[in-house]
Amino acid sequence: MAGRGAGAPLLLQLSLLLLLHLGGTLGCALVTVGSPVVPLGSAVTASCTIQRELCRGLEQGKVRISWMLDNKLVAGSQLQGPGDTEVSNLTLPRFNHTQARLWCCVEWNGTKQRVGMAEIRAGYPPAKPLNLSCTLNLSDYGLTCRWELGTDSHLPTSVVLKCARSRGQAVTGCTPRGGHSHCTVPRRLLQLYRQMEIWVSATNALGTAESEHLRIDPMDVAKLDPPTLQSIQSIPFQTDCIALAWDVAWGTEHMELQCELRYRAPEDPAWALVTGIIGRAGTAQRCGFLFGTQYHFQMRCRRNSASALASWSEWSPGRNYTTHEKAPTGKLDAWWGAQPAGPGGQLEVQLRWKAPRRREANGRVLGYRVTLSPRRRGRDPPTVCNTTHTQCSFSVPAGTRRVYLSAYNAAGESAPTEVVLLERKGQPVAGLRAMPRDEHSLWVHWEAPLAPVVAYVLEWQWVTTEPGHCSMCWQMERDGAATTALIQDGIEPFQRYNISVYPLYEGTVGVPVHTTAYSQQKAPSHAPKLHLKRIGKSEAELCWELLPVEMQNGFITSYTIFWANSITDVARLPASRDPRGCAGGGILPHRQPRVPPGATVNPSLSSFVMRGLKPSTLYKVHIMASTAAGGTNGTSLTLVTTVLDDSEIQFLFLTLGLVFVVLMVLLICFQKNERVKEQLWPSVPDPANSSLGKWVPAAAPQESLQVLAAREPGPAAISTVTVLEGEPAKQPGKEHPGLAAAAPALPRPYVRQEGPAEPVQYARVGSAGYRGQRLLPEPGPRFYENLRGRGNGGGGGAGDWAFLEEPPATFPLLQGLRIGGAEELHECRAD
């Protein structure tokens, strides 16, 4: 139930809308306009009348009328009409739509309802048709006419082709279909061999336009089938003329025709046209053809009448023909170079020449011949060169001043061209310069010398790292008064050319003058690669190799160095003026603020010194090579400045060296001075290396004593034995019984032998230190008395030695020597 209650108002609104629409259709609203088609941009007036009794649901309340142009609301004026009507008038001052709908609306229940509509179109009157032309087709004798329509009128336009006979009314000849601009008038409406008037009429709602009236005889515009070329042959006695025969197309044998012939060689850019060939069929002659040249021929015809509107047939199928050859004519342009060929008295000649022009070749040139004398009747001169190329090198006897050059083909040989081998010592030209005309040619200018010139020879060669020989890179200007020449053979953009000019005088050749040029420049292909030559604390020297000429693409105007570290902006520095390259140093340029903007430097420089750098800092550097057409950046080079400069490092090393020398001198002085040495390094005896420390004591009864073996097994020569006196209070018989019992046989002395003839050191032995002493289980006593004695010179202790309180374990036990029942110090000397 709730759903039905909600849907009732919607259903009521739809019903009212349907009633309003039906009422408007049945005459509820009447919309009128001043004109349904108006000129574009003009004013439009409209009126809408509402009749209440015809619009159900609008009987009560006020009727509000509004207007809409398509979907745009426009304002009108409303007033009370006669009877029970409401009228609204609308004026649009400028109607700029080519087509639009004007709606009359009424407001009901807050919404606008469309109750009437009028469609309005705007445009222009039709334009005049142009370029009317007609052609009569002889197969069905239909007249097909074509034209061009003018600008679009934006309105529906009807186009018809009208025609009128000489004494008849104008009729519609045909109507184009599908918007085309051509149609065909049938044969029944045509009048052949008499004048007719034909034109095109275009009509729309705003007017009518007609083309120019065409007055023609339909047969004058008949398009014939093309003729057929039957044969082409040369006239026997005039080899530069040909005779051509043709046949007319079928159906045109009874007509008087006017024909045209065209021909061209494959090298010709345009056709050569022969007009005024009159006749039904037959032959035609034409002269002025080149010898030994292939030509392509075509022919077309039309009806011979006085009308300029007569149509030509299509060109006939082509036919090729090659004229007869003839021996070459004219002289060859030649240029030479000569130099001695060693001690044999020969002259080496490099001869170059230009191929004859097509008009002088008279066919296909088979080769060239160089002789030392001209051809005489009945005798052939000696040939030094026979080639198919346009250059030749050969040897001639010294003193030869003339050679003879000729060209030959299948028909014969040309007259010889005399080539005089002149010396190159004449006056040169001045002010030579070259400039591009376009990317494939160069203008060369010079100043004429004072002496009269016969001709000029221009040479040009592509400059490469490995130059080659170019046989076609020269030309001769035979006008001696000329001061300019255009060279274009083999000229390519972005390549450097070396150009030379030779003036030719009577009897000599001028000294050449050279210049270089580009037909077009661009930025270099690559920039040079930077190399680090040396680096210091505040400066770095860079160098690079000059670019090969193939990569320059133009004249290098400057090299520019860019460098920066991680905390500063990029600086721009011009390269320094150092012509020595990587082998030499550089001259410091000013930094960027001191360099004038756009300043350039000598492009031949190849090194640069950066100064004012920070110590121990990383920098990135790159180089830009520039021509007049732009610049190219190179790869970056990373470098790090040093902490110390070279001079500082040298000073540091010098200081360290001086300190080292002073220390060495002081050390040597201390080593030589005994007093200083005794103060700084006092002499301390080493008991382990003394003579006493090397003696071997008697073995104790409890354990066997280790006796050091002598260094040499031979007998020792004893020099001196000294026996020290014992204490007088003690008697030998009162010794401790244990000692006496424990004493073994006589102890063996420790002998030190220094050599076969070297005496052994003597020692002073104090026997009192052992008297009454009890032997311990250890090999040595715990305590010794310090004894001092004097000898008469020995090896290692300077005559003195002492017992240590605790000697090493290797020290032998010392015992007193008993001689004659008393302890005395004896001195034994060797014999």
Image: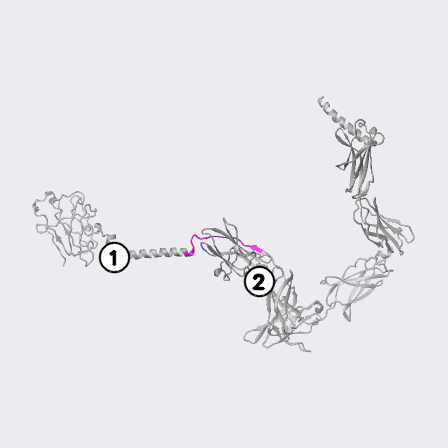
Confirm whether residue 421 shows in the render.
no
Whether 659 is among the magenta residues is no
* Real-space Cα separation, disc 2 to disc 1, in angstroms: 79 Å
Q: Please, what secondary structure does the residue beneath circle 1 have?
A: loop
Residue 213, image x, y percentages: 86, 53
The local crowd at label 2, few if under 14, some if 14 to 19, many if 20 or more residues have their Cα within 10 Å, is some
Marks 2 and 1, the one that precedes in the sequence: 2
Q: Which residue is mark 1?
A: 673
For image coordinates 91% across by 54% down, the residue present is 166
Residue 560, image x, y percentages: 54, 56
Q: Please, what secondary structure does the residue beneath circle 2 have?
A: loop
Front label number (2 vs 1): 1
Q: Which mark is residue 397?
A: none
**Residue 626 or 683: which is nearer the viewer?**
626
Q: Which residue is mark 2?
A: 464
**Residue 564 or 817: which is nearer the viewer?**
564
Quarter of the figure with the C terminus: bottom left
**Residue 360 or 650: which is nearer the viewer?**
650
Identify the magenta region.
631-647
Q: Quadrant of residue 103?
A: top right
The local crowd at label 1, few if under 14, some if 14 to 19, many if 20 or more residues have their Cα within 10 Å, is few
User: Given contact means CB atoms under 8 Å apart, are the residues at marks 2 and 1 in contact?
Assistant: no
Whether 643 is among the magenta residues is yes
Amino acid identity at mark 2:
Thr
